Each structure stands twice: as structure tokens, then as C-alpha cells.
Image: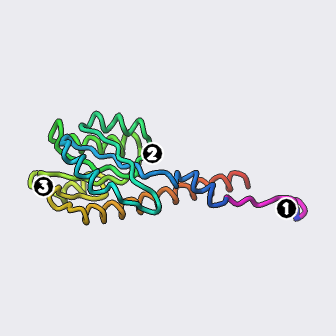
Amino acid sequence: MSATDYENDELIFLDDDAIDTELHLGKDWNILIVDDDEEIHTVTRLALSDLIVNDRKLNFIHAHSAKEAKERLHEYGKSIAIILLDVVMETDDAGFQVVKHVRDILNNKRVRIILRTGQAANIPEEKVIREYDINDYKTKTELTRSKLVTTLIAAIRSYEQICLLEYQAQAMNTILSALL
């Protein structure tokens, strides 16, 4: 190509609105609460109901078993930002099966998984972190409202950064494909 071939080419930059649309910004953050104890759902919803992160509210999606969690994950896809996940539900390892499903079957590395357990003595934190692709591990007793808010904000920021990096990688691939 000569220099004159480039004179008529225009560079098109996406504006912020296009990026927001692509990253689903401006919508509520989808938070999947997976726990067989209805009280945990209620307490979590009450503790976080007024929380706004980056000008977006939280949308709570509920599942009471590993099976329901998998159904919600298929229903909402990659729009779920955070999973607050109990380990022991219908089986002693139901939560771990959900983690494997998310990471291995759905190949979703984007969603941030926060494991919450009421039985920490039976489930060593260090072993869990090493063996499962989770992003945080908390006991239900340690999660005060303040700690839950801090944990959630950090996880949402991480999720948002991952989404942005994925979007930029796709945009770069599109540009490279157009140049070749």
C-alpha cells in the first residue's frame, strides 16, 4: 500500500457510550447468592441493599442449591459479576462442584467467586485456595456488614477490570484483523 492509500482511511474510535454498552455498564451488578439457608439470603440482601458501586446498584439473584446455581449461571451467563457461594449445601462439596462448573464447564474466568462457609474447621482455607479457582474465602461469622461491603467492592472492581481487559483484547484483535 502506498501513502495515498492511507490518506482516505479513517480511524474510528469508540466513544465511552459504546464501551459502556459493550461492558454492560450502567446496569445493575448481578450478584448470585448461593446458600441453602434462606436467612443468609435475607441478611445479605438487607446488608447490601443500599450499596452502590461505581454508580450501579446490586441485583441479587438467588439459588438454594448447586443445581439451582448452575441453572442461574446458564440463565444469566457472564453478566453475573460476583458469586457469594456456600460450600456445604445438599452435599458436603456442593459449592466446590459449582466452582468447577463455572471455571471448567462454562469456562468463565471473569466472575469473582467468594466462598462463604459456616464450617471453616472442616474446610481448610489454604487447601481450598490452592485447589479451587476462587477469589476469596470467608467464614460466615467473620462477615460483618463492613467486611462484606469491602469484600464485594474489591471483587466488583476486579470483575470490572477483567471485563475491560477482555474488551480491549477483542478490540485489538479486531484492529489487527482489519490490518491484515
Q: Is 100 above or below relative to 10?
A: above
- Whether residue 84 is visible, yes or no, is yes
Q: Where residue 82 is drawn, which disc sits there?
A: none
- Left or right, residue 67 beside residue 19: left
The amino acid type of the residue labelled 1 equals Tyr
Q: Which residue is mark 2?
A: 78
Q: Main secondary structure of the magenta part?
A: loop
Q: Position of residue 9 (x, y in %)?
A: 83, 58
Give the label, 1 or 3, closer to the camera.
Answer: 3
- SS type, badge 1: helix
Near-viewer residue (128 or 28): 28
The amino acid type of the residue labelled 2 equals Lys
Q: Which residue is mark 3?
A: 120
Near-viewer residue (75 or 52): 52
Dot 1 or dot 3, earlier in sequence = 1
Dot 3: within a 10 Å radius of its alpha carbon, few (fewer than 14), some, or many (20 or more) residues? some
Of the 4 image quadrants, the one containing the N terminus is bottom right
- Left or right, residue 80 beside residue 116: right
Which residue does the image show at 25% across and 66% down from the upper left?
146
- Residue range highlighted in magenta: 4-14
Q: Which residue is mark 1?
A: 6
Residue 115 within the magenta-colored segment of the rendering: no
Dot 2 or dot 1, earlier in sequence = 1
Which residue does the image show at 87% across and 59% down from the upper left?
8
